[in-house]
Amino acid sequence: MTTALTRRHLLTAALATGVAVPLGAGHQQAARATPGPVRLTLPAPTGPHRIGTVSLHLVDRSRPDPVTGQHRDLMVSLWYPAAPGAGRHPVAPWMSAAPLHALLAANGFDPGVAASPRTTGHEGAPALRTAGRRPVILFSHGAGGHRSEATIVVEELVSHGYVVVTVDHPFDSYSELPGGRLTVPDDEIPVTPWDHAHDIRFVLDRVEDLAAGRNPGTGRPRLPAGLGAVLDPRRIGMFGWSKGATATALVMNTDRRVRAGLGLDGPMQSQPPVTGLDRPFMLMTAELTRAAEPSVEEFWSLLRGWRLNVQADGALHGSYCDGQWLVPQLAAITGMSDEALAGWIGTLDPARAVRIQQAYPLAFFDLHLRSRGHLLDGPSRAFPEVRFLP
């Protein structure tokens, strides 16, 4: 308990101020590396749609880079329902090799111990246009994270008909820019939730560009056929993990284009602070609970629209992201002890965590962007570990 409390408060302080905290900070990696990389896997999404994806390099010319003094570089990925024939296009990796190696090393693993999982997203596949424009959801990652960290949630949403845009926040993420330029979190450069929020608002403008038929990508890269025609800029949601959850609230504080927000175990701390909202917001808490963190309780008390707080028993801070599924695979590869593994993932079974990640975000956005669904009406027999907190 003492360790958990200490780690929780370290996380809260770091996330509020923008200091990068690697996945699993506070846990020791007592493991041995096996020869050669083993390819990790991701669970398949449950929806009927095939998935397409494309990555874009965007440049925000209104904000200077704090290191070079040039403009701010962002890498984003768009995930969308794909037309028949998507299988002819290559499958995208969860993360390219260079940032994956850096991410593994930062978390105490041999950087060559594992190869990136393959996603179900087909690079550059034509968009499925038969259903017209689709709701768009943006994702903001946690401190020292990356835009791939919630791919399980992203693919589930897209397989059920959403378009999702994921964003790497410069100097707070493991990313690869054009030309193979690797970027990693930099402890010397403060990146706050407001920086994430400003990035997202810039990307929202670019989503509108795409929907209007313009190409905002650097160098005007070839876009997947039909992509702009499936984006609905009038139905926009957002979710984020940890610092990204705080950023979600900040974006909604300042931009009414976002109609509904979901926070995955966020500290809800920033300067200037998060304020109240009159639009739907759901908290999926784990360690940064309303009981443990006054900032979360204060944010909850200020919500004036539809609100809900759910929590999965046994979940830790990262349990609603891909690490809950991927770290056990790394544990098996490296010989990590059961005790050490529990320090990473808690007692929430990874397979159950995947089902929760797939079901609850989808139900939230279905309710508020499509006006359908009943899972959020109350506790479900299908998810006995998920509690609805008053």
Image: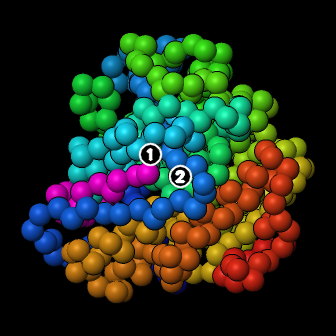
Q: Is residue 8 left or right of residue 137?
A: left
The local crowd at label 2, few if under 14, some if 14 to 19, many if 20 or more residues have their Cα within 10 Å, is many
Q: Is residue 42 left or right of residue 334?
A: right
Residue 115 covered by magenta stretch = yes
Point out residue 367 in the picture as x, y percentages from the top left corner: 81, 53
Residue 221 covered by magenta stretch = no
Name the amino acid type tagged 2: Glu
Q: State yes or no: discs 1 and 2 in contact (Cβ < 8 Å).
A: yes
Instruction: Please give the range of residues in magenta.
Output: 107-120
Locate residue 74: give its quadrant: top left
Residue named by callout 1: 121
Dot placed on the residue nearer the N-terminal end, 1 or 2: 1
Residue shown at the point (34%, 24%) measured from the top left: 67
Residue placed most toward the observer, 136 or 205: 136
Residue named by callout 2: 155
The local crowd at label 1, few if under 14, some if 14 to 19, many if 20 or more residues have their Cα within 10 Å, is many
Q: Which residue ends up furthest to the right in the rendered image? A: 304
Q: Is residue 252 above or below residue 27?
A: above
Point out residue 150 in the picture as x, y percentages from the top left corner: 50, 54
Point out residue 99 in the picture as x, y percentages from the top left corner: 28, 45
Residue shown at the point (27%, 78%) measured from the top left: 332
The dominant secondary structure in magenta is loop
State the separation of the CA atoms marked 1 and 2.
8 Å
Figure coloring = rainbow
Residue shown at the point (23%, 30%) measured from the top left: 180
Question: Which mark, residue 10?
Answer: none
Residue 155 can be seen in this image: yes
Residue shown at the point (48%, 53%) measured from the top left: 151
Secondary structure under tag 2 reads helix
Residue 187 can be seen in this image: no
Secondary structure under tag 1 reads strand
